[in-house]
Structures are given as C-alpha cells and as structure tokens.
Amino acid sequence: MSNKKVVENKDFVSVKNGDWLRSKFTLVITALIPIAILIGMIYWFATKGASLIETPVVPVEKLDFERIILHPEEIIAYVRNTGPTEIAIAQVTVNEALWEASIHPNNVIPRLGRATITIPFHWVEGEPYEITAITSTGLKFTDAVEIAKETPTPGWRYFGIFAMLGVYVGVIPVYLGFLWFPFLRRVSKKWMNFFLSLTAGLLIFLGVDALHEAFEVAERTPGVFQGVALITMGTLLSFLVLVIVGKRTIGTQASQKSDLYVRLALAYMIAAGIGLHNLGEGLAIGSAYVLGEVALGAFLVIGFAIHNITEGFGIVAPVASGEKPRNIHFLILGLLAGVPAIFGTWIGGFIYSDIWATLFFAIGAGAIFQVVYEIIKLMSRESEAGIGNLTNFTGLVVGLLIMYITGLFVVI
C-alpha cells in the first residue's frame, strides 16, 4: 500500500511540474507575440512597404557638425547624419571656396553615422572661417569658427592647464567655504535652521541653473537625440536613485542612528550633488576655452571663487551642530564636491559632446533637487514648522539672493 502511495505522489508531482512548465511557456509566448508581429511589420515596410510611397522631390537630409578642430595647416570637422536616409558628401567649401578634403571612413554616411572631414588649409589665427559640406543632392550644411585658434591636443601641458582651472573654480572655493564651520558651530539652533534653509536656497539656485544649462545645450543637440527627453531621464533618474540611497542611509532608520551619522550622510549627499553640478560647470569652461571664448584672467578666477565659495558653506552646514566629525571627512567632502570640476574641464577641452553635456547637467540638477528634499526633511524632523517658519523661509530667500548676486561676478 505504501509503495502505491509513493507512486501516486510522484505522478502528482510530475503532473504539477508539467502544468507549471506549460503555464510559463504560455506566458512567454503571449509576451513575444506582439514583439514578433511588430518585427514582421517593420521588416515588411523596410523591404517592400517603403516603395509604395513616392520619394519627395526635395530630399530629406540632415547633417550636424558636432565639433570643429583646428590644427596647424588643417581643419578637422566631425559631422553626424541625423536625417532619415544616408547622405553622400560630394564637396566641401571653406569660406565659400571649394576645397580638397578627405572624408573618413567614407563620404557616404549612414543614418546616425559619423564621419571626419579633414581639410588641408592654412588658416590664420583670429580670423573667422565657415565650413560647408555639400551633399550629392546639392543641399548645404554649414558651421562656423568665429575666431580661429589652435585646438588643444591631449598632453601634459594642457592636462595641467585644465586641471588648474578645475582647482581654481571647483576645489579651492569649496575648501574656502569650509572655513565658516567654526562660525556655524557657535550659532544657536534657531540660526542653525536659518543657515540650513539658506543652504537649501543655494542648492535650489544651483539646480535651476543646471537645468537652464541643460536646456541651452539641448538646443544645440541634434533633434534625433531628443535633448528634452535626455534632460527628463537624467533629472528624474538621478533624483530617484538618490532618494533610494537616502532611504537606505538617512531615511526610515534615521531614528536608530546617531545624529552625527545622519548629518554626515546628508553632507556627503550635498557634496555629491554639488560635485555633479561642478562637473557640468567644468564641461562648459573646458569647451569654452577650446573655442577661445573664456578670458583666462584674474577676474574670471575671482568671479568663480566668489560664486562657488557658498558651495562649501552648504556642505558643512548640516554637520555644524552636535558632535564634530573627524577631519578626514572634511578632506573627502571637499574632494567629492570640487574634483569633478577638473574632470569636467578635461572632458570639455578634449572630447566635448553636446549630448553628454546635456545629460551631465540634467543628472546634476536631479541630484541637487534630491539633496534639497533631504534638507527639508531634516528640518521638518527638528522643527514642526520646517521651511514654513518665517526665519527659515527668510534663510531660503537669502540663499537664492546670494547665489544670484555672486553669479553676477561670473563671466563666460
């Protein structure tokens, strides 16, 4: 009798496993059917359906100049086909004069493909030049160099120059802002909340500024790459990722952790958000330097130092009350906030891309807005009124005004 039961149990298990496999198989098939039909539709239209539509008289072509580089005795232009069909470049002109040029890898560029146009040309520093690519259909696509200047090439000299710029506009101002830490340690709790609100105001200004920069760069981004969509994704994803990080560090379990831990975690999040913003700022500086649009003088250095010194203040404000953190934390916080400016100048100077610049600015904006959210949560835990308190609201407004006024000293 017992053997019979064992056999019956085995049969039951096998039937149960078979049903489970059939249900999973059915689930996968129902998920793949719409995709298979869509692939079939696309294949049919690409091979046969497109022939049913007459080709327009005016060809639909679009060519974008991504970057123009000037080296001694030559002009190099990087172009990308952002139209719906392939493009064949037939001729190249410089200042409306036909000029011999080599095109790599090929003069026929597929959709979203990239090509390098190399033009042997004796250009003169300080003069303007207009480069035009003429396609086989006769359409012209033009970009210009307003002031000719040799483009820096990667090397120790320019790496050093760009690193120095990053240190001036990113690292030094942040550490200067840390010098307010002893002052903040001596203020009352009421005024500490005022300065936390002021920090929120500083960061809101930085976040909006980063979004403004992102939209400006997005206007130069080829439409096919959907600059606004890049901004939306970058901002939302960075915000949500940091919200998850915040919940795991200073969120739901904040009551179980020390006050120093919570405030230090917030300081690190502020430093990371400012670092992402400074990365975008470095991108702008590096690319502007390459184009000869930045006057490398004392006024620029002073302007950025005044504007960015408030960033260091905002980082140390959350840890100014209560137990003092170890000094190593101040070193790390300053590097986290300031060093990205150096990497930004390198990227902007040597491999700048409007697409990546748009995304970096958007990510920085999202990170900064999330940090503002954490600051407001911290203030709400310490005070029922939170940001709605008159003193705290005044601090927020003062923070915005400080960033606006100091921003007037920055000239790019």
Image (cartoon, rainbow, N blue to C red):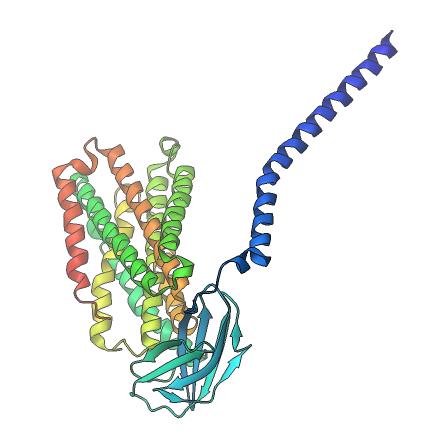
List x then y, in percent, for residue 27.
62, 32
Q: Quadrant of residue 192?
A: top left
**Viewed as shown, does residue 85 lie left or right of 150?**
right
**Viewed as shown, does residue 314 lie left or right of 79?**
left
Q: Residue at x 39, y 73 (%)?
A: 349
Q: Residue at x 37, y 84 (%)?
A: 150
Q: Quadrant of residue 190?
A: top left
List x then y, in percent, for residue 20.
69, 26
- Total labels drawn: 0
User: Is 402 situated above or below 121?
Assistant: above
List x then y, in percent, for residue 42.
56, 52
Front-most of residues 259 and 277: 277
Whether residue 326 appears in this view of the structure is no
Name the quarter where the N terminus is drawn: top right
Q: Quadrant of residue 19?
A: top right
Q: Residue at x 24, y 47 (%)?
A: 200
Q: Which residue in the rendered view is the most extreme toward the top?
A: 1
List x then y, in percent, for residue 370.
33, 45
User: Is 71 situated above or below 237?
Assistant: below
Q: Residue at x 49, y 71 (%)?
A: 114
**Viewed as shown, does residue 303 lie left or right of 226?**
left
Front-most of residues 29 and 116: 29
Front-most of residues 332 and 68: 68
Name the quarter where the C terminus is drawn: bottom left
Whether residue 116 appears in this view of the structure is yes
